[in-house]
Each structure stands twice: as structure tokens, then as C-alpha cells.
Amino acid sequence: MRTSNLSAQPCRRSPVRSFPTVRHDPANVRCDLCGGAERDEFIRGRDRQHGVPGEWSLSRCRGCSLVYLDPPPTPEEIAGFYRGVGYYAYEESARTFREVRVSRLKRHVLRHWYGYARLGLATRLGRIMAGAARGIVSTRNVIPWRGEGRLLDVGCGVGSVIWRLAALGWTVEGVEMDAAAAEVGRRHGLAIATGTLEETALPDASFDVIRMSHVLEHLPSPSRTLAEVRRLLRPGGVVYLNLPDISAWNFRLFRSCWFPLELPRHLFHFTPQTIARLAKKCGLRLARLSHNSGPGKFLESWQYLREERARAAAGKAALAAAPPGPRMQDRRWLAVALKIPFRMVDLLGRGDIMECELEPVADPNAGGP
Ligand SMILES: [Zn+2]
């Protein structure tokens, strides 16, 4: 079985462009989505996850309701938000690069339900087996086959997702800002470029699928990067985005303790409305949007709230004060009990995490097929 079909290809490397070091003048800050300067303070908070010192402010644009870190941090400041904090996407576990095994039954399911023509049996028997196995075999994170199966993962970390997708037949590439994480993936034969997507300068219309999982909210200019994604997408291609939804009910409940606020690493916060507007601005359209959160963010936010209260009770001198008992997210029985209620919240469109599919809008200037 093929575990990576790019191991022999050279990796593209590009020099890291130097950025201006001046801090943004608050009077010159413009909304990345609508270009407006008028905004209101939305919420203030601190880094509850990795303890980067300081307090940050999010503003909401009066023109389009985009929420963003204000003032926008410089590239050097952004780099400091990740330095030495053990960011999860950059860590390689012992299981990350183990051999991917796809069962015979799953191959039938992938062929007949997800368009993987090279897998499973094309016969009637294969179709019957696929129908019988569909509800049994896990297809979580499976991407339906598209075009020639060329896929780019922007912000791929060490490349754990593209490693698994390569085993399903995708021709995969990744782009990663963190040089050490990208190097880990390259050591395992993955084609991962170091830098921003804009710096890698990949050819026009070169991918059938581009995924950005929990990436867009970390970028200094989501509109600039998404426009670049649009340029790289082939006709008939699709962009998969996962990101927090600040119109979630849990945000209203927990405010600055809402786990996905992730200050200061999340520079932007979107809603279904602002993500649709951003897509349109970048020559894409929001084809599908759903929520897939479960109770995890609720429990993690609840834990932040408990820590906040314990800290308040202990006084400012006891910054390390921890509430008694196990963390909320470690109480398995609670997670199980809340699974169905939070599935309902997701179905009502008020969950914490959005899953979006963006499709290219035909470009009248494009010379493609
Ligand atoms: Zn705006």
C-alpha cells in the first residue's frame, strides 16, 4: 500500500520574506473583510491556555461585524505567541506516522460512497458490501474524491492528516509556518514547504482540494490568504475550512472564558455571515456549512471558568490556584451525557466549530477548461 506518493519529490523551499516591524497605528487599522476603520471594543481577555503574558482586546467592525484582535499584532509578536508554548499541531506523537491500514470493507465503502474509483471492487458484490458496511466502518475525516486527487493542506503542522490522506491515494502537499514541524513531516517523506502560503508561490489551478483546519483565524490577513487559495484551486475544486463560530451559544455563556477564543493566537473570529462574505470577496462561494463541535468546548470553557473563580477566591497572589477535583474535560461521564444535547446545538447552528465547504465562482478572466 502506498503511504506517501511524494517521497521522491523535492520540497519547495522559499526564503522567508521580511516584514515591516512597525506596530500598527490604531488610527490606521482597517478591517480585513470590508476595509472599514470604525469598530467597537468587543471583549478583552488573556491567554488561558499557554499563559503568554498580557491582556488582549478584540474589536468588532461596525461595517461587517468581523471580530479581530485590535491592535493587530506585528509578525514578530505573532511568532512570540507560539514560541515555547508546545503548540499541539506542532507535536509529533508516536502514532502520527505509523502505517495506515485501510480495511477491505472500508475500501468498498470509499469506492461506492466517496468516489474512490481505485479502491474496492467495482462489481455488484462490492456495491452490496459497501452498502452493508456503510454504517459500521468509520469514515470520519474522509474527504470525497475530487478530480485527479491533488490536495494541499495549509497549516499542516507535522503533516499527520496528509500522511493519512496519502494512504487513500491523494497526491498531497503541505504548507507550514513552523520550520521545525515542517521538517518533521519532510523527514517522513511528505512534501511540506516552510513559510506562508503566499511565500510558497505554487502554480495556478494546481489543486482539487485545499484544506485549512483551524488555520484561517490564526492568519494576519485571512482575505489575502483565501484569495491565494482561490488562485491555486482548479475548476470544480473545493476548499474545506474548520474554524470557531463566535456566534456560538457557548460564547454567550462563557464570554472571555470561551475556549475557542484562544487569545492571542486567534487573530480573527468569524460567524456564518462573515465567512460567507469573506468567501465572496475572494472569488469563492459558501456551498455548505454545518457545525460539528460536541460537548468538548463547553467542558473546556467550564474549566476556564472554574479556574477563574478559584483564582478570584484565592486572591491575586495565588495565580496558580487550581479548582479541586478533575478537570471538566476529563469527566468522561459528563462528556457522554452531553453528547446528544450538544449534537442538537450543532444541528441548530449554534455550536462552537463551523465546517465550511467553499467552491470557486467562475472567473471570467480564467482561461481554464
Ligand atoms: Zn468590516
Image (spheres, helix red, strand yellow):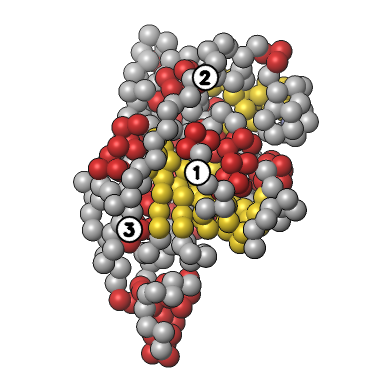
> Judging from the image, what secondary structure is the residue with disc 2 in?
loop
Q: Classify the position of ligand 1 by quadrant: top left, top right, bottom left or bottom right.
A: top right
Label 3 belongs to which residue?
5
Q: Provide residue 278's location: percent of width, then percent of height.
A: 68, 41
Looking at the picture, which amino acid does disc 1 mark?
Leu
Which of the pair 39/215 is nearer the observer?
A: 215
Q: Residue at x 66, y 24 (%)?
A: 59
The disc, 1 or 3, on the residue closer to the chain's N-terminal end is 3
Label 1 belongs to which residue?
202
Label 2 belongs to which residue?
19
Q: Quadrant of the N terminus?
A: bottom left
Instruction: Report the label total.
Output: 3
Alpha-carbon distance for marks 3 and 2?
35 Å
Alpha-carbon distance for marks 1 and 2?
21 Å
The disc, 3 or 2, on the residue closer to the chain's N-terminal end is 3
Asked if labels 2 and 3 touch by Cβ distance under 8 angstroms, the answer is no
Q: Provide residue 230's location: percent of width, then percent of height.
A: 61, 47
> Judging from the image, what secondary structure is the residue with disc 3 in?
loop
Looking at the picture, which amino acid does disc 2 mark?
Phe
> Judging from the image, what secondary structure is the residue with disc 1 in?
loop
